[in-house]
Amino acid sequence: MEKGIFVTGSGTGVGKTVIAGAIAAAIKAHGLDVGVMKPVASGAKEIDGKLVSEDAVYLKKIIESDDDDDLVAPVRLKPPIAPTMAASTTGVSIDIGKVWKAYKELTNRHDFVVVEGIGGLMVPIDDTLFVADMAREMDLPLVIVSSDYLGTINHTLLTVEYARSRNLRIKGIVINMLKSSDGFVREIEKYSSVPILWTIPYIENICVEKCAHGDIVEYFCGGINISKIMRKEG
């Protein structure tokens, strides 16, 4: 069995947090002890003098995790921009050692860890590290989340090609917020040779900021092959 999965996106705003949470909840429903992680989070909100990642709060709530915030989201930055820029703007340095330490602790605590990246694979974390490097260092396969928007074929195929160039394993692609026609989904599968794990229609009452997940978990559990995500191949 895999020790976890790394959820990345074809871009920002495609619903990585929602899909990462649904995967974690579906795996928990299989009877496993699941942990969640948002290693680097920008756009954190200041609450009672402490920076809080809404993505991390959502991920914790959907599986009822009691892990400490510093484990789930060890690096939190206030500006809602790329980590390198957010760190520079606020005059802080990103301590990547905190990420590796937290990840090791989570893998020791749980059977399976769902890690959500930030933006896409080419988002820089510091001067030498990209999101892709983080996934590789964690030795986790990818689930790529895309969505129904103009340009999604190009962005998704570019993500797949870049992942392959970095020798990252890809479990499959989830198409989120599908509006109507799924013609582009078949195009992505055809030209990427990567399986489409599941397509998710637009679902009402999902809001990360309000920790509302609607019936995404039930929908997800009803169709996606969670065993494929969990099973270690090759």
Image: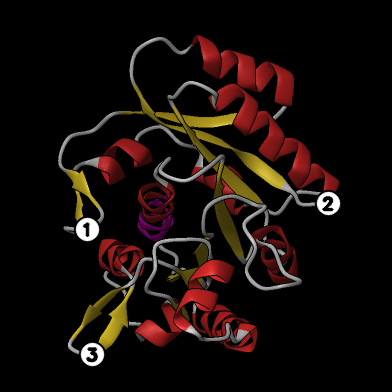
Rendered location of residue 133, percent (x, y): 73, 64
Q: Are marks 2 and 1 in contact (CB under 8 Å)?
A: no
Instruction: Residue type at mark 3: give it.
Output: Gly
- Earlier along the polypeptide chain: callout 3 or callout 1? 3
Of circles 3 and 1, the one toward us is 3
The disc, 3 or 2, on the residue closer to the chain's N-terminal end is 3
- Secondary-structure class at tag 1: loop
Q: Check the image and tell me how it is coloured.
A: secondary structure
- Does residue 1 appear in the picture of this structure? no
Say what secondary structure mark 3 lies in: loop
Q: CA distance from mark 3 to mark 2?
A: 41 Å
Residue 220 % position (x, y): 36, 39
Task: Please name the amino acid that badge 1 sits on.
Answer: Glu
Is 220 placed above or below 76 here? above
**Element carrying mark 2:** loop
What numbered label is drawn on residue 25?
none
Q: Nearer the viewer, residue 46 or 33?
A: 46
Q: Is 94 on the left-hand or right-hand side of 41?
A: right
Closer mark to the observer between disc 3 and disc 2? 3
Mark 3, other Cα within 10 Å: few <14 / some 14–19 / many ≥20: few
| Residue at position x 54%, y 77% in the image | 88
Residue at mark 1: 209
Instruction: Classify mark 2: residues with Cα within 10 Å, few (<14), some (14-19) or many (20+).
Output: few
User: What whole-number distance in Å separates the C-alpha atoms at marks 2 and 1?
Assistant: 34 Å
The part of the chain drawn in magenta is 23-30
Numbered label attached to residue 49: 3
Q: CA distance from mark 3 to mark 1?
A: 19 Å
